[in-house]
Image (cartoon, helix red, strand yellow):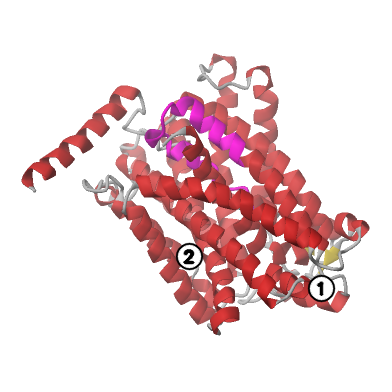
Amino acid sequence: MGAFSNFAVSFTIISVLSGCLTLYYFGMTYGGPVDIVWGWVIVGIMTTIVGLGMAEIASAYPTAGGLYYWSAKLSKNNPGAWSWFTGWFNLLGQVAVTAGIDYGFATFFSVFLNLTTGYPTTNGYLLIMYGVILGVHGILNTFGVRIVSFLSDVSAWWHVLGVLTIAIVLFFVPSHHASASFIFTKFENKSTLGVPFYVFMLGLLMAQYTFTGYDASAHMSEETHNADLAAPRGIVSSIVVSLIAGWILILAITSVIPTNPATYAATAANTAAPVAIWETALSRLGAELLLLIAVIAQAFCGMASVTANSRMLFAFSRDGAVPGHRFWHRINPRTRTPTNSIWFCVVFAFILAIPSMWSNVAYAAVVSIATIGLYIAYVLPTLLRRLQGKSWQGGRWSLGKWSPVVGWFGIIWVAFIAVLFLLPEVAFSSINRDNFNYAPVAVGVVLLFSGGYWLLSARKWFTGPKVQGNEAELARIEGTFTHIEQELADVD
């Protein structure tokens, strides 16, 4: 991959046409327009700070292991433990974000098929669609990195042009728009919670979940030219471009949001709220055309997420950290892709969304799990970097004197949101099976499993990554793959 392809993978996984749209209903419910518009800006700025801290480390250690490898290199005491828990939180977040992206895609694609062919949108049919989509993305990733690289490049341009198209249509075609005061200052609370500040904070999940997956630039380092510069630039530029493109998209949708209280409430209760907004503002055909732009972007996003997810699992298994690691880190000699890791990610992403059959907050729980898991993994290496102080030797891409300020601000922000998104999304008195936020359960299970595994076994043998990520080691691995391919060619 070149530098643009590396950026494109992260930009595609962030995908403002996925996260913004699939959780727009959540923003309408928790805070409304003021939360959607200004929450995006707040979260975007804080995410840029987190990404800057990560980028500095990515330049020093460009390897597919990414975050958990960084923790091992940066820890002065017990690098194995830091690497172990960083890796497991990253794996949890990667699987959950794949589930969140493709389930959101399944939701919007099912709505598109319902509008055009009458396809049912009940939970059962939605889960079937979700399984099919995951399977297609698994197959695409199995074919090899070249097709993924090409589609990621196409995806980056599709996202930019798609956002501009939707924005231009919504700004200029509808005959009526909401007032500026409504767009920028209107607070709406359609939840059962009674504390406005708490509601506003929960509403930040829409933006924070969207700004995930940019660690893909680090995970693709071993397949990227000049990765010590391309990977950090890919991380930061994917966040900044998404911040700008996402805000344009959000302003366009919010400008045509229904202002009538009854219509607003009905739209907020619709998990495909943007489609309902487009149909009201334009027409059924207009909504279908904009929806087509969105679902193609979401398809690209899910494909790239499986790519990053499988590379992380491959690297973690390569170092013996996952049960059955010998099976998961095998490379397909024909496609040179970690095929078994790809299908591991597909299957477990499907399992994570099964509660959607009976839970009406399952999707919000999945994206909470993704956000918490990924951001804890994002910030642990930054914390270790800060504890090293001036003794740390970085790479060619550096923050210089701004490194301490950027690092600590990012750490504090992640600590805040990690607690926030574990909290209930409904009033305590109304919690039941259908609206229980099971994010704490999923995070707790992974923490208990990884912690128990560490105490009972892994602490005796896991000392951190076995592959050091230097050029000689990576060249040796690449040479092994080439040798295998040549042997197969000779046999053929």
Give 230 or 186, whichever is nearer the viewer: 230
Q: Which one is closest to the eye, mark 2 or mark 1? A: 1
Q: For the residue carrying disc 1, how many other residues have a C-alpha within 10 Å: few (<14), some (14-19), or many (20+)?
A: some
Check disc 1 and report the residue beneath it: 264
Instruction: Say which element carries label 2.
Output: helix
Q: Are marks 2 and 1 in contact (CB under 8 Å)?
A: no
Asked whether residue 340 is drawn in magenta, I would say: no
| Segment tinted magenta in the rendering | 209-238
Residue type of the residue flagged with mark 2: Leu
User: Where residue 271 sits in the image (x, y, percent)?
Assistant: 66, 71
User: Where residue 253 sits in the image (x, y, percent)?
Assistant: 76, 61
Q: Is residue 415 visible?
A: no
Point out the residue furthest to the left here: 491
In the rendered view, tell whether residue 115 sits above or below residue 407: below
Instruction: Say which element carries label 1.
Output: helix
Secondary structure mostly taken by the magenta-highlighted segment of the chain: helix
Instruction: Point out the image quarter for the N terminus.
Output: top left
Left or right position of 139 against 294: left
First along the sequence among labels 2 and 1 = 1
Give 202 or 157, whichever is nearer the viewer: 157
Asked whether residue 215 is drawn in magenta, I would say: yes
- Residue at (59, 15) in percent of width and height: 390
Residue type of the residue flagged with mark 1: Tyr
In the rendered view, tell whether residue 420 sits above or below residue 429: above
In the rendered view, tell whether residue 427 sits above or below residue 92: below
Check disc 2 and report the residue beneath it: 352
Label 2 – label 1 distance at C-alpha: 31 Å
- Residue 199: quadrant of the picture: bottom right
Q: For the residue carrying disc 2, how many other residues have a C-alpha within 10 Å: few (<14), some (14-19), or many (20+)?
A: many
